[in-house]
Image (spheres, rainbow, N blue to C red):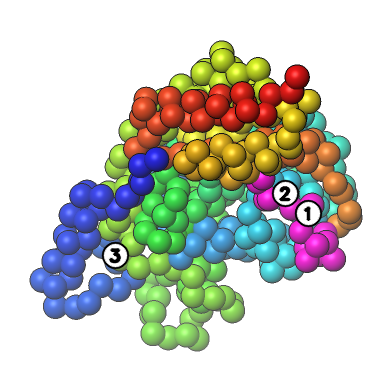
């Protein structure tokens, strides 16, 4: 399968431009300068307006976004069940209590029904993860949250550029967090993140929480006078060279999505047409694929789902045979959670699928190779 090489010619050219810019200025590249401003403007424009702040990592983006909301201490935050540990850590390290949601049946994403089942009088926020490249039903969830005075933070880390009801995800809740590390649809280098909101006051709070409490938006603010800072906060911002990479990467996001969708479409339709033991997870034209699940019907095989997936991987197909990002499985988080909750729907879909890796370099040939490998392994392990 072809490597991605996300830092391509456009990213290299923008890096060289940034180095030349600072060489001409007689200083080394720093942070919060010309290229970060350009990148944040481009990001906000992609979202249809609003405010963006580039930060060090996706986890930092989540931490900052939660901090900016200024939620009541020890209040509960409803959180999607299939997510990265950084999501849970950002909640806990802000002094809040995570309360796991379940997903919809046969789905990685949460729906409004699952939110209603887990709401309590202590709920202050919903951290809604748009998993694996597909938008959750964020409009319905935001409506019920607004009726109850509950904030919504969209975690868009796996779904850059995906749409819901025609609008980009990240534009529905009060604030959103994105990861821009090297495997995501748009990147800023090895690691990175973005906090996005349409609320100027929230944006200002995010800026301060990202950089040691500095009120950088205030007229007359002196960056070298810590007595003007607002509150204790960490240094979580990014750098000019990362933002230069981000400028090039975000400029081709739509073509990245289109190419990834073509691969997913071909594999999904091929599996549904030709396999008797597997089926595609499903996709929509508004998706921005990050990984793609294939569901296995183990009763039609003489092996387990994981054994089947590992055999497909042995044929040279990049995949995760058993996606272990179900938060209910992590014992070290259990003492911090509001209660013990097993997330049966999320567990069921996770246990019945393996997840194909993909990138925009995959073509018709790679989709055909993937289908051929799945069918070959299926013939070997077919029951009866």
Magenta stretch bounds = 322-337
Instruction: Give SS at disc 2.
Output: loop
Q: Residues within 10 Å of mark 2 (few under 14, many from 20)?
A: some
**3 shown above or below 272:** below
What mark, if any, has residue 329 been given in the picture? 1
Against 289, is 78 above or below?
A: below
Q: CA distance from mark 2 to mark 3?
A: 34 Å
Task: Residue 192: give x, y in percent of width and height.
Answer: 44, 60
- Compared to 372, does 324 lie above or below? below
> Residue 147: x and y, percent?
75, 37
| Residue at image mark 3 | 241
Q: Is residue 253 visible?
A: no
Q: Position of residue 208 (x, y in %)?
A: 51, 69
Quadrant of image for the N terminus: top left
What residue sits 29% from the left and 42% below the top?
251
- Mark 3: few, some, or many residues within 10 Å (few <14, many ≥20)? many
Looking at the picture, tell me which residue is in the foreground, 93 or 225.
Answer: 93
Q: Name which quarter of the figure residue 202 lies in.
A: bottom right
Can you identify the residue that label 2 sits on? Answer: 326
Residue at horizontal 52 percent and vertical 17 percent from the top = 269
Q: Which label belongs to residue 149?
A: none
Callout 1–callout 3 Cβ contact below 8 Å: no
From where the camera sits, is residue 100 visible? yes
Q: Position of residue 340 (x, y in %)?
A: 89, 54
- Write the residue at 50% across / 38% down: 315
Of circles 1 and 3, which is in front?
Answer: 1
Circle 3: element type: helix
Q: Is residue 149 magenta?
A: no
């Amino acid at each position: 399968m072809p490597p991605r090489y996300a830092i391509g010619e456009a990213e290299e050219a923008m890096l060289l431009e940034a180095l030349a810019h600072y060489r001409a200025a007689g200083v080394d590249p720093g942070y919060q300068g010309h290229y970060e401003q350009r990148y944040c403007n481009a990001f906000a424009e992609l979202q249809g307006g609003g405010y963006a702040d580039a930060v060090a990592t996706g986890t930092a983006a989540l931490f900052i976004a939660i901090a900016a909301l200024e939620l009541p201490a020890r209040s509960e935050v409803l959180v999607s069940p299939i997510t990265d540990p950084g999501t849970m850590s950002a909640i806990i390290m802000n002094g809040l209590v995570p309360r796991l949601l379940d997903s919809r049946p046969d789905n990685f994403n949460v729906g409004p029904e699952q939110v209603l089942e887990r709401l309590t009088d202590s709920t202050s926020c919903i951290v809604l993860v748009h998993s694996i490249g597909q938008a959750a039903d964020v409009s319905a969830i935001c409506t019920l949250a607004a009726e109850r005075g509950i904030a919504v933070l969209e975690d868009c880390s796996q779904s850059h550029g995906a749409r819901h009801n025609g609008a980009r995800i990240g534009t529905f809740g009060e604030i959103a967090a994105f990861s821009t590390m090297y495997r995501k649809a748009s990147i800023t280098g090895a690691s990175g993140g973005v906090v996005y909101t349409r609320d100027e006051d929230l944006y200002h709070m995010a800026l301060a929480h990202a950089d040691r409490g500095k009120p950088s938006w205030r007229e007359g603010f002196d960056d070298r006078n810590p007595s003007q800072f607002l509150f204790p906060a960490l240094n979580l911002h990014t750098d000019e060279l990362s933002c230069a990479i981000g400028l090039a990467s975000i400029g081709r996001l739509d073509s990245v999505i289109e190419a990834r969708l073509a691969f997913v479409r071909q594999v999904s339709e091929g599996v549904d047409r030709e396999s008797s033991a597997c089926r595609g997870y499903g996709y929509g034209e508004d998706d921005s694929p990050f990984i793609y699940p294939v569901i296995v019907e183990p009763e039609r095989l003489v092996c387990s789902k994981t054994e089947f997936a590992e055999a497909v991987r042995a044929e040279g197909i990049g995949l995760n045979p058993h996606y272990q990002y179900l938060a209910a499985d992590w014992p070290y988080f259990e003492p911090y959670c509001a209660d013990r909750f097993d997330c049966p729907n999320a567990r069921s879909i996770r246990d019945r699928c393996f997840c194909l890796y993909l990138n925009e370099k995959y073509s018709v040939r790679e989709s055909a190779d993937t289908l051929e490998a799945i069918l070959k392994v299926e013939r070997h392990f077919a029951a009866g």
